[in-house]
Amino acid sequence: MIRDTANKLVEGFYGILPYQTAVHLANAQKEFLHAVGSLIDEQIKWTDIHIERAHGKQESAEPRSESTMEKQLHR
């Protein structure tokens, strides 16, 4: 019920905008959500690494694709 109400509000908001503006805004929102998802994925990866390092398994916990700066930030 709450979801239906929220969906109607969002659709009403998009409905008052010109079509191309609504499409652009929706695409920007999707990109923002993808960015947040990427941050969450990265934090999940580092959570596992921190656990491994905390228990003395540092050799296998180092990701192969990180940059030198990322390595320094997370040590």
Image (spheres, helix red, strand yellow):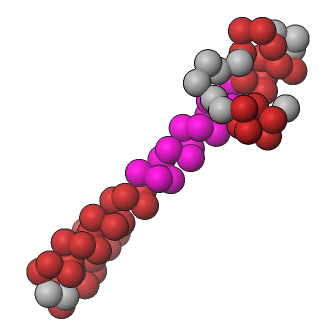
Q: Position of residue 35 (x, y in %)?
A: 47, 53
What range of the chain is rendered magenta?
34-48
Whether residue 69 is situated above or below residue 7 in the rendered picture: above
| Residue in the foreground of this view, choosing between 52 and 2 | 52
Q: Residue placed at 56% from the left, 44% from the top?
A: 40
Whether residue 38 is situated above or below residue 3 in the rendered picture: above
Whether residue 55 is situated above or below residue 67 in the rendered picture: above
The stretch drawn in magenta includes residue 41: yes
Q: Main secondary structure of the magenta part?
A: helix
Q: Position of residue 59 (x, y in %)?
A: 78, 9
Left or right of residue 19: residue 10: right
Q: Residue placed at 87% from the left, 21% from the top?
A: 54
Q: Is residue 65 visible?
A: yes
Residue 4, by quadrant, is bottom left
Q: Position of residue 13 (x, y in %)?
A: 25, 84
| Residue in the foreground of this view, choosing between 65 and 20 | 65
Q: Is residue 8 visible?
A: no
Whether residue 14 is situated above or below residue 32 in the rendered picture: below
Q: Residue placed at 61% from the left, 18% from the top?
A: 64
Q: Can you say which quadrant of the picture contains the N terminus? A: bottom left
Query: How many numbered badges does the structure rendering display?
Result: 0
Residue lying farthest to the bottom in this orientation: 16
Residue lying farthest to the front in this orientation: 68
Residue 23, by quadrant, is bottom left
The stretch drawn in magenta includes residue 8: no
Q: Residue placed at 20% from the left, 81% from the top?
A: 21
Q: Position of residue 27 (x, y in %)?
A: 27, 64
Q: Can you say which quadrant of the picture contains the C terminus? A: top right
